[in-house]
Amino acid sequence: MSSASETPGVSVVIATFNRANFLSETIDSILAQSFQDFELIVVDDGSSDNTREVVERYGSRVQYLHQPNRGPSAARNFGVAHARAPWIAFQDSDDLSLPDHLESLYIYAQKFPACAVVFGNGGYLEGPEHNRRTIIPPKKSKRLEERGVGLADLFEKSIMRLQASMIARTAYESVGGMDESLRICHDLDLFFRLFMSYSVGYLDRVLFLYRKHEGNITRDDELRLTENIKVIEKLFHDYPRARDLLGHNLVARRLGYRYYRLAKGRWRRNDHRAAFQALDAAIVLRPFDFKYRFYRFQWGRIAQTGRSYGV
């Protein structure tokens, strides 16, 4: 690791909130990296557990920062503001970095200096999920490395993970860092902005292990979907050419599906009025989609009978 008087090659930023039970294992996985030219910054986003005590056990090997609770985006921006390296790598406080994580990304960044962002794949700590061992399916991962990453790849599936990325600090700062109004989809929003302004590289390698547990904020489907829609609309507002790059059919299909998923979740929670609003938005986008119109008809019949419909 770099000393306080040296400029490190990479600044690793961990934002954390009440994750003391996982944090030590995460920090240990960073400190055990084969690449050691880095500084490690932990931003405590107003934790009420013993996070400070856990971090302070590591002494000068880890820089501890504290702020009142403002959310993960603000915590990461705060960490970057205190970083000294030209490259930024993020890690979640409940996930694990594999030993060659930083080395693999740093070597790629040096080999392809035109890239302002490089990212790789991730695996699952507790074993296979969704019938696969990696977040990005192996065949797709290989294809992304061979042909490069397109906007449609990011748009169709959120393939980029902060935990598997390394970002040039100048690029991060030039696009304004993370949107602090977002709690879940801040990574997708950031990567959209970076992709529209800079070259992005992909490495077909598993770099970190995702830990799935009850505390994962991404389990909040309502927030995840509403933020996802917001981020997509923001992309088209800030970068109008993105809509042309993607094409009308892809945009309508993906946005329509997100509204449909949002509607189904709301219906299950008996928030029927909001469910109709989301489903109607899906139908506007995909007027000839039989599935959306079928649900609209079925739910409409239930509404007419007054069963479980809060009016």
Image (spheres, rainbow, N blue to C red):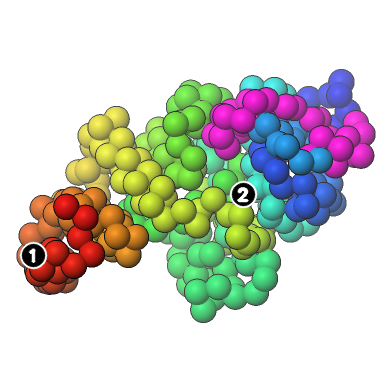
Which residue is disc 1 drawn over?
304
**Amino acid type for the residue under numbered disc 1:** Gln
User: Residue at the location (66% across, 46% down)?
Assistant: 91
Q: Is residue 101 above or below residue 115?
A: below
Label 1, secondary structure: give it: helix
Question: 272 and 245: which one is in front?
Answer: 272
Callout 1 environment at 10 Å: few (<14), some (14 to 19), or many (20+)?
Answer: few
Residue 65 lies in the magenta stretch:
yes
Label 2, secondary structure: give it: helix
Question: 115 and 132: which one is in front?
Answer: 132
Tag 2 near tag 1, CB within 8 Å: no
**Amino acid type for the residue under numbered disc 2:** Gln
Which residue is disc 2 drawn over?
163
User: Residue at the location (75% across, 27% down)?
Assistant: 65
Query: Which one is earlier in the sequence, the residue at label 2 or at label 1?
Result: 2
Residue 145 lies in the magenta stretch:
no
- Residue 31: x %, y % from top left: 84, 46
Res 154 visible: no
Q: Is residue 2 above or below residue 207?
A: above
Q: Which residues are magenta?
A: 51-80
In this picture, residue 18 sits left or right of residue 218: right
